[in-house]
Amino acid sequence: MNYDAFMEPLTWFLTGMEKHSDEYDPHLYGDGEGFFRAMNYHMSKLQTPSLMVSMNELSNHDHSRFLTRTNQKVGRLASAGAEAAAEGIRYGVFREAVMIQMTWPGAPTIYYGDEAGMCGWTDPDNRRTYPWGHENLELLEYYRYMSGIHNRVPALKKGCVKQLLADRQLIAYGRMHGKYKAVVAVNNRGTEREVEIPIWQLGIEEEEPLVRVMLTTEEGYNVGAVKVEHSQGYVTMKMPPVSSVLMITHVEEFFTAAALKE
């Protein structure tokens, strides 16, 4: 189930919440260094074949829905009531979580309804009926894009992972598999920030094209091939509040119909 090496470090970093919504920890919330320390420690306990097929879940049948955790409220069905599970939720944070889920080593595993925007406290509230006819269509489409990118890009399915940046409310990492590289950055802060990502650590050459294929924000997401400028081994970019970005090399092999935007 990979709680230790995925669900828990991710939840603490993005929301500060324990996976049952039983506790809020402001020190773990947004701790980029702590995120990587926890991931590295727990991933080291797994053999590589096991790690690469571990179930990377945001929610499941035993814990509160991740979308509910984004409201940063401690509660359960008996104490808070069902409606409170959907109060104050943050879709921008949820999109960041899906970005990491689809780009981190392991097997992205979707608990039914997460893709439709379901909320719920811990068991049994997390097992609500699927919202047929009331799905969040924007989230459904975002999941389709991200799962498609994951399935196409070898670096995301088979690649090793390397930490690139870690700060308060900020992480960036790379995936590498042969000539294929991917770069992910997450700004969980509520304000815009400029980041300088050392892509040279992934072996990306000066003249090697790097293309953004997904950007998420609080308002939604932007999919499409957008060329990313880099110089002397670094990408310098302004990231919107509560945003994430995915950039890859050799985009033409996976998205031949996409026109590059300068």
Image: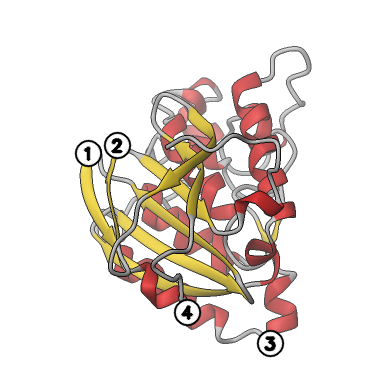
Q: CA distance from mark 4 to mark 3?
A: 13 Å
Task: Say which label, 1 or 2, has the lower sequence index.
Answer: 1
Asked if disc 2 and disc 3 are in contact, CB closer than 8 Å, the reply is no
Q: Which mark is residue 192?
A: 1
Identify the residue position indicated by label 3 in the image.
Answer: 47
Q: CA distance from mark 4 to mark 1?
A: 28 Å
Nearest to viewer (mark 4 / mark 2): 2
- What residue appears at the point 53 percent right and 73 percent down from the top-left corner? 161
Q: Report the amino acid beneath label 1.
A: Glu
Q: Report the amino acid beneath label 3.
A: Gln
Task: Say which label, 4 or 2, has the lower sequence index.
Answer: 4
Query: With 6 as the anchor, is 38 left or right in this view?
Result: left
Asked if disc 1 and disc 2 are in contact, CB closer than 8 Å, the reply is yes
Circle 2: is it few (<14), some (14-19), or many (20+) Cα within 10 Å? many
Identify the residue position indicated by label 2 in the image.
Answer: 240
Q: Report the amino acid beneath label 4.
A: Asn
Task: Say which label, 1 or 3, has the lower sequence index.
Answer: 3
Circle 4: is it few (<14), some (14-19), or many (20+) Cα within 10 Å? few
Give the SS element for disc 4.
helix
Q: CA distance from mark 2 to mark 3?
A: 37 Å
Asked if disc 1 and disc 3 are in contact, CB closer than 8 Å, the reply is no
Give the quadrant of the N terminus: bottom right
Q: Report the amino acid beneath label 2.
A: Pro
Identify the residue position indicated by label 4 in the image.
Answer: 40
